[in-house]
Image (cartoon, rainbow, N blue to C red):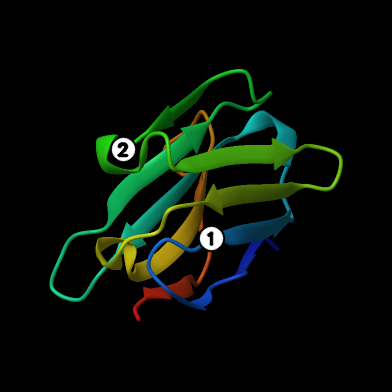
Amino acid sequence: QVQLVESGGGLVQPGGSLRLSCAASGFTYSTYTMNWYRQTPGKERELVASISSVGGTTAYKDSVNGRFTISRDNVKNTLYLQMMSLKPDDTAIYYCNARGWRNDMNYWGKGTLVTVSS
């Protein structure tokens, strides 16, 4: 079955760095656009970063552009999010998302918590 398993979250001080990973299985990973979303209590889930199926195109939410880098390994079926210069506003649960060409090709991980605090 389809699985997306995030890891790498944790507590970090402002200005610090974290690298999130998302291990994918159960679908043809290399053909899917992959995304990182995040959500805080009381707010809608928001798109943070996207990467095309072959990794040639990336896009970022304005507030993370220049600080976060999304990448993928289509051999290891793994998605990454390198986060630098973290701010308290980056505190959220981060979710991995796989989006295929059909509406039903839309899969989610269970999330990993990132807390930025001194």
Residue assigned mark 1: 17
| Residue 91 shown left or right of residue 114 in the figure | left
Residue lying at 37% horizontally and 35% vertically, measured from the top left: 65
Q: Is residue 59 above or below residue 21?
A: above
| Residue 52 shown left or right of residue 30 in the figure | left
Residue 55 rendering spot, x and y as whole percentages: 65, 25
The amino acid at mark 2 is Lys
Callout 2: SS: loop
Callout 1: SS: loop
Circles 1 and 2 in contact, beta carbons < 8 Å: no
For discs 1 and 2, the disc positioned in front in the rendered view = 1
Residue lying at 18% horizontally and 60% vertically, measured from the top left: 44
The amino acid at mark 1 is Ser
Residue placed most toward the observer, 60 or 32: 60
Figure label count:
2
Cα separation between marks 1 and 2: 18 Å
- Give the number of the disc on residue 61: 2
| Residue 3 shown left or right of residue 51 in the figure | right
